[in-house]
Amino acid sequence: MNALYLRTFLFCVNLFWRNVQSEILLSVYPGDDVILPCCLDSEVDLQDYTVEWSKLEVKPDPADRQGRVPYVYLYRNRKTVTKVMMETFIQRVSLNPDGLKRGDVTLKIRKVTLQDEGTYRCFIPGLNHRETVHLVVDPNGVTAPTMETSQFNINISTPDPGGEQTNIWISRSRPALWISLGVFLSSIFSAGLFIKMRERAIT
């Protein structure tokens, strides 16, 4: 019975951590360079795969007869496909060629503008791999906790595709954090109640 409780506890911890991890928020200032992380758990060579970076707020291009949504970045057939990319990003985005060989399709955006703020999604169709990053551009140049972000931030230095070091702030979404915590605690309580009921039934 203790083994069952332990397995349930570990499952809940894993579920809670996955929900927290999925709510990554990057906060930068206008003019900064930013790194949008996206990588596989294993070092798979992705040079022959398609990699799509899109912005979820972008609507279909009215000039496109097929109604397609332009990409922030598109890598296909071992090259960047600029004809289906948003014009404002073409000269400012890049992947790390060495990273592609190791399962890392992190995207660098240079000289961030206020219009770049939004939710970005990385997608590798051949592996059905998705990651989402929320980018906030602070026009005042000061990062401050709000009701939407937690009060703990982590400043890290990350190697970008150009070989330089870029500092980014990572925060956790407060609503998602509390919801995940609630689910976690409820799961633990339910598991403990179930085990106690089983023990009483046996005795």
Image: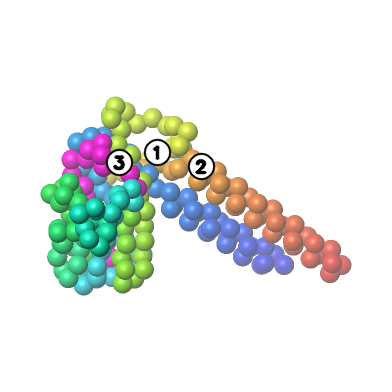
The reply to whether residue 201 is visible in this rendering is yes
Q: Amino acid at mark 2?
A: Pro
Contact, CB < 8 Å: mark 3 with mark 1? no
Decide: is 127 above or below 108: below
Q: Which residues are magenta?
A: 102-119
Cα separation, mark 3 vs mark 2, equals: 19 Å
Q: Quadrant of the C terminus?
A: bottom right
Image location (x, y in percent) of residue 98: 18, 62
Residue visible at 36% across and 57% down in the picture:
131
Q: Which residue corresponds to mark 3? A: 117
Image location (x, y in percent) of residue 87: 16, 49
**Upstream in sequence: badge 1 or badge 2:** 1
Mark 2 secondary-structure assignment: helix
Which dot, 3 or 1, sits closer to the camera? 3
Q: Which residue corresponds to mark 1? A: 153
Mark 1 secondary-structure assignment: strand
Q: Amino acid at mark 3?
A: Glu
Quarter of the rendering containing residue 45: bottom left
The reply to whether residue 159 is visible in this rendering is no
Which dot, 3 or 2, sits closer to the camera? 3
Q: Which residue corresponds to mark 2? A: 175
Mark 3 surroundings: few (<14), some (14-19) or many (≥20) residues within 10 A: some
Contact, CB < 8 Å: mark 3 with mark 2? no
Q: Which mark is residue 28?
A: none
Taking the image as shown, residue 110 lies to the left or right of residue 116, namely: left
Cα separation, mark 1 vs mark 2, equals: 15 Å
Taking the image as shown, residue 118 lies to the left or right of residue 184, namely: left
